[in-house]
Amino acid sequence: MKITYTFANGETTELEVTSEWGAVVLDLDRQEYNANHRETRRHASLEAFNLDDALFPSDENVAGEVERRERDSAIERAINLLLPAQQELIRQIFFEGMSATEIARRDGVDKSAISHRLDRALKKLKKLL
């Protein structure tokens, strides 16, 4: 019986062996194939997910998202250190979209008073940040 043997360097050679040894080699080859198949069929290769030669490709800018969250957290902490009236003014103007004119009209003061309050609050926020 002839079997084909491939060396580690890629060379291939045919060997003449007895049928007993041929059966042993074929049995070992089948066991090796089954073991490899059993180990790999349940697992997904990471290369299958490697679409753009990136480890895990994504449309999201993860570093930018982390920076944005850290910045938002720092701003929120700084706003919490303002006076309650300043916090309310910042919330109304920047988060609720109210204008200084609307706030002035509601509070019965001049628009410039609201602008000055906002300026003071923003200056304090800059110091805190």
Image (tube, rainbow, N blue to C red):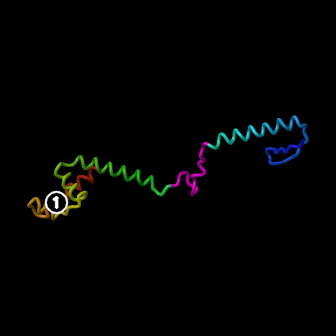
Q: Secondary structure at mark 1?
A: helix
Residue 16: quarter of image: top right
Question: Which residue lies at the image location 33% right of the left edge and 51% below the top edge?
Answer: 72
Query: Badge 1 local density, few (<14 within 10 Å), some, or many (20+)?
Result: few
Drawn side of residue 114 relative to residue 60, left or right: left
| 88 and 83: which is toward the camera | 88
Q: Where residue 47 sits in the image (x, y, percent)?
A: 60, 51
Question: Which residue lies at the image location 22% right of the left edge and 54% below the top edge?
Answer: 91
As shown in the figure, which amino acid type bears the numbered disc 1?
His
Drawn side of residue 55 relative to residue 128, left or right: right
| 6 and 86: which is toward the camera | 6
Question: Which residue lies at the image location 63% right of the left edge and 44% below the top edge?
Answer: 41
| 35 and 58: which is toward the camera | 35
Q: Is residue 47 magenta?
A: yes
The prevailing secondary structure element of the residues shown in magenta is: loop
Q: Is residue 114 above or below residue 46?
A: below
Q: Is residue 26 magenta?
A: no
Drawn side of residue 68 relative to residue 10, left or right: left
Q: Where residue 18 sits in the image (x, y, percent)?
A: 91, 37
Q: Where residue 23 sits in the image (x, y, percent)?
A: 84, 37
Classify the position of the N terminus by image quarter.
top right
Q: Is residue 34 above or below residue 94?
A: above
The residue range painted magenta reads: 42-57
- Please give the residue where the numbered disc 1 appears in the rendered image: 116
Q: Where residue 51 sits in the image (x, y, percent)?
A: 57, 56
